[in-house]
Image (cartoon, grey):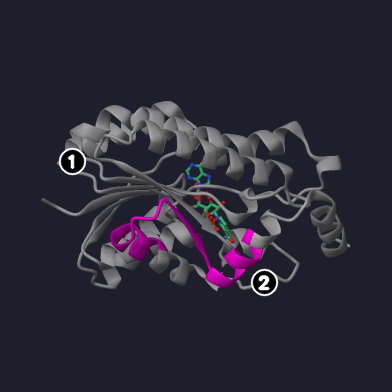
């Protein structure tokens, strides 16, 4: 049987390096994002690196449920099995809650939460057809508490966490496992927009290697990284509200 995976948000940042990492390790990677041009660039890059596996461009707007179904069918017609599905596509718009718009809020909720949930629901009949072993979601440490300038982002990442917990419980007796990743800051086009200092920021290639290794060699349901930042944020998560608010106000000044 071939080694196969499907990665969304594959044309850039964490998704791009995760795709290359899986292909380097002999996987056929169905790589999805909206831009066919960027996906083709990724395919060309992977070819020039002479990797053991290969990358197949599978353009998809994950906010379009019909397209998710079409792509799932395409994969089912072109491979016998699908080991991993990594739902990574996401976005962040930094904005003061006082100035938030319906449009920007909807964009983040649709992409970071609704599309992920839709994707899993649409994939359900394919879990047994393709013998899907793991469905992994890329949430964020930002989903652990409400942070300044990030109401829609934090809440979308927190909401997807609880949804995945429910799926993992309901699928307990089946072969598929759900996993959830909480990255801290990773250097990608998404964070390149940030003007503030991002503590413990890591390269996207490092994040991709962590995702690959944890999916293959760890059974943990929740994986947060980098370790130091996750530890600090875990402590901040249990801080009483008045203290937490004070800290955030100080940091956001
Ligand atoms: N970077 C960080 O510090 C960090 C930290 C924690 C969590 N995360 C999470 O990690 C994930 C990847 O982030 P990143 O930093 O690698 O971001 P990125 O470099 O901006 O990449 C985002 C990817 O998502 C794709 N995408 C956007 N909208 C899409 C849509 N509607 N349908 C399909 N694909 C879409 C983009 O390609 P197209 O535009 O071509 O569609 C691109 O490939 C996100 O879920 C993000 O929230 C990132």
The image position of residue 6, as x and y in percent, is 32, 47
Q: CA distance from mark 2 to mark 1?
A: 43 Å
Q: Nearer the viewer, residue 19 or 84?
A: 84
Residue 90 left/right relative to 236:
left
**Position of residue 58 measured from the top left corner of the image (x, y, whole percent):** 34, 45
x and y percentages locating residue 16 in the rendered image: 42, 60
Residue beneath the point at 14% across and 52% down:
2
Span colored in magenta: 211-234
Label 2 sits on residue: 199
89 up-or-down from 17: above or below = above
Of badges 2 and 1, nearer the viewer stands 2
Q: Secondary structure at mark 2?
A: loop
Residue drawn at (58%, 34%) of the image: 110
Residue at x 20%, y 39% (from the top left corner): 131
Give SS at disc 1: helix
Q: Quadrant of residue 183?
A: bottom right
Is residue 108 shown in magenta? Answer: no
Q: Which residue corresponds to mark 1?
A: 78
Q: Main secondary structure of the magenta part?
A: helix
Number of disc labels: 2
- Farthest left residue? 1
In the displayed structure image, the side of residue 241 where residue 92 appears, left or right: left
């Amino acid at each position: 049987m071939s080694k196969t995976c499907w990665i969304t948000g594959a044309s850039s940042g964490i998704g791009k390096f995760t795709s290359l990492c899986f292909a380097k390790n002999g996987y056929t990677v169905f790589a999805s994002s909206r831009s066919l041009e960027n996906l083709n660039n990724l395919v060309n890059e992977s070819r020039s690196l002479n990797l053991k596996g290969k990358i197949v461009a599978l353009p998809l707007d994950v906010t379009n449920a019909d397209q998710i179904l079409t792509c799932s069918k395409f994969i089912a017609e072109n491979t016998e099995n699908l080991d991993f599905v990594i739902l990574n596509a996401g976005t962040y718009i930094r904005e003061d809650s006082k100035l938030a718009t319906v449009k920007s809020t909807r964009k983040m909720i649709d992409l970071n939460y609704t599309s992920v949930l839709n994707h899993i629901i649409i994939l359900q009949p394919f879990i047994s057809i393709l013998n899907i072993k793991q469905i992994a979601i890329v949430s964020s440490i930002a989903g652990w508490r409400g942070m300044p300038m990030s109401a829609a982002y934090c809440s979308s990442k927190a909401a997807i966490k609880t949804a995945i917990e429910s799926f993992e419980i309901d699928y307990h007796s089946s072969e598929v496992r759900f996993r959830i990743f909480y990255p801290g800051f990773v250097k990608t086009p998404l964070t390149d927009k940030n003007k503030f200092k991002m503590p413990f920021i890591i390269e996207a290639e490092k994040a991709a290697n962590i995702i690959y290794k944890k999916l293959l060699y760890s059974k943990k349901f929740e994986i947060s990284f980098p370790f130091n930042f996750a530890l600090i944020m875990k402590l901040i998560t249990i801080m009483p509200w008045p203290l937490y608010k004070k800290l955030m106000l100080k940091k956001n000044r």
